Image (tube, rainbow, N blue to C red):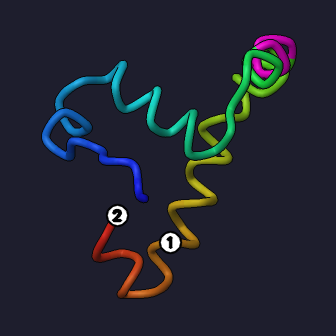
Amino acid sequence: MAEHIDSNRLNSDLRYRFEYVSKFLNFTSDDIAMLNTFAPIIFPIVPVITDTVYRKLFSFDITKHYF
């Protein structure tokens, strides 16, 4: 049976959303530790990564519609 996710709460409760996404992606404390380790390296290039991803998403009308 499918697990119920409260869509209203998903859109209004940040902790609930994080828990849902974490569970969906099988995100563990090891993943958090790895992100904390790489944060000083990744953080400075986040704007470049974000711009690149959005440029790609916006290159198609269907994905641009959702983002």
Q: How crowded is mark 1: few (under 14 residues within 10 Å), some or many (20 or more)?
A: some
Q: Identify which amino acid the numbered label 1 is placed on.
A: Leu
Secondary structure at badge 2 equals loop
Mark earlier in primary sequence (2, 1): 1
Relative horizontal placement of residue 2, taking residue 25 as reference (left or right): left
Q: In this view, does 19 lie above or below 67?
A: above
Where does the image place residue 31, in percent across and percent down from the top left?
Answer: 78, 25
Where does the image place residue 65, in percent across and percent down from the top left?
Answer: 28, 76
Q: Residue furthest front?
A: 1
Q: How crowded is mark 2: few (under 14 residues within 10 Å), some or many (20 or more)?
A: few
Q: Mark 1 points at which residue?
A: 57
Residue 46 position by quadrant: top right
Where does the image place residue 15, in percent across and percent down from the top left?
Answer: 36, 19
Q: Which of 14 and 45 is in front in this view?
A: 14
Assign the C terminus to one quadrant of the image. Answer: bottom left
Q: Identify which amino acid the numbered label 2 is placed on.
A: Phe
Q: Is residue 55 above or below residue 6?
A: below
Relative horizontal placement of residue 31, taking residue 8 as reference (left or right): right
Secondary structure at badge 1 equals helix
Disc 2 vs disc 1: Cβ atoms closer than 8 Å? Answer: yes
Relative horizontal placement of residue 31, taking residue 17 as reference (left or right): right
Where does the image place residue 6, in percent across and percent down from the top left?
Answer: 21, 41
Q: Residue furthest left?
A: 8
Determine the residue positioned at 58% across, 72% down: 56
Q: Residue 67 carries which label?
A: 2
What is the magenta segment's predominant secondary structure?
helix
Q: Which mark is residue 49?
A: none
Q: What stretch is highlighted in magenta?
A: 33-37
